[in-house]
Image: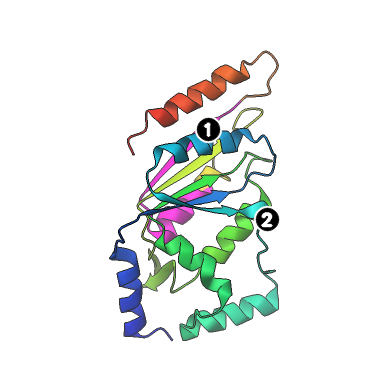
Amino acid sequence: MITQLDYAKLFFMKTARGKEKMTLFINACVREQSRTKQLAERLLDRLTDEITQIELSKTRLPKADGEFISWRTEMCARGDFSSPVFDIAKEFARADTVVIAAPYWDLSFPAALKSYLEQVCVVGLTFRYENDRPKGLCRAIKLYYVTTAGGPVVSEEFGFGYVKALAQGFFGIGECVMIKAENLDVRGADEMEIMAGAMAQIDALKL
């Protein structure tokens, strides 16, 4: 059970600001010349925060099988987050800004991003329940979701829409912004012009 002292510590983590703000860059790109990453790097260049990157293609996450889920549920109930397994959730919770770079794959995003999000959804670290409803404990007030697609982004529901619902409904991150470049590989499309348009959108952002 999480004590009142634990809640006090979590409140401090959510409100205290250090001298250096931190942007957490969640990189779900896998291709060497990823266009999604190019856009994300343009955005990161505009941010003045310290950048912490998680490169998901090189990050080994715990296998979320029945044994692991039971153990993690027990640890959360006890308020024991001493295991290194919880480090990525702690890092997510203390970020001032979150940037996610995720290509548009099969109407959604790479599976590694879903696995990562499952690992940062930790009761007592990134959110808690209040009157049976989730309440965010994350410090960030803004999340940027960067994506590119060879064809049209048919629906945002299973990509950006999912991340936005999770960020606002669980983590307490109020503002979520999507930056996208689509139809890049459609016959007759001007890839450079489409990318330039997305870059201009990034340059026009009020950060």
The residue to which callout 2 is attached is 58
Q: Is residue 49 magenta?
A: no
52 versus 193 height, above or below: below
Q: How far is disc 1 from disc 2 in space, using C-alphas? A: 24 Å
Q: Residue at x 36, y 60 (%)?
A: 139
Q: Residue at x 51, y 21 (%)?
A: 196
**Depth check, front residue: 43 or 144:** 43
Side of 182 relative to 77 (left or right) = right
Q: Position of residue 37 (x, y in %)?
A: 58, 38
The residue to which callout 1 is attached is 180
Element at badge 2? Answer: helix
Q: Quadrant of the N terminus?
A: bottom left
Q: Position of residue 16 (x, y in %)?
A: 29, 65
Amino acid on which the number 1 mark rests in the picture? Lys
Q: Residue at x 50, y 66 (%)?
A: 89
Amino acid on which the number 2 mark rests in the picture? Lys
Boundaries of the magenta span: 162-182
Element at badge 1? Answer: strand
Q: Position of residue 198 (x, y in %)?
A: 49, 27
Q: Is residue 171 magenta?
A: yes
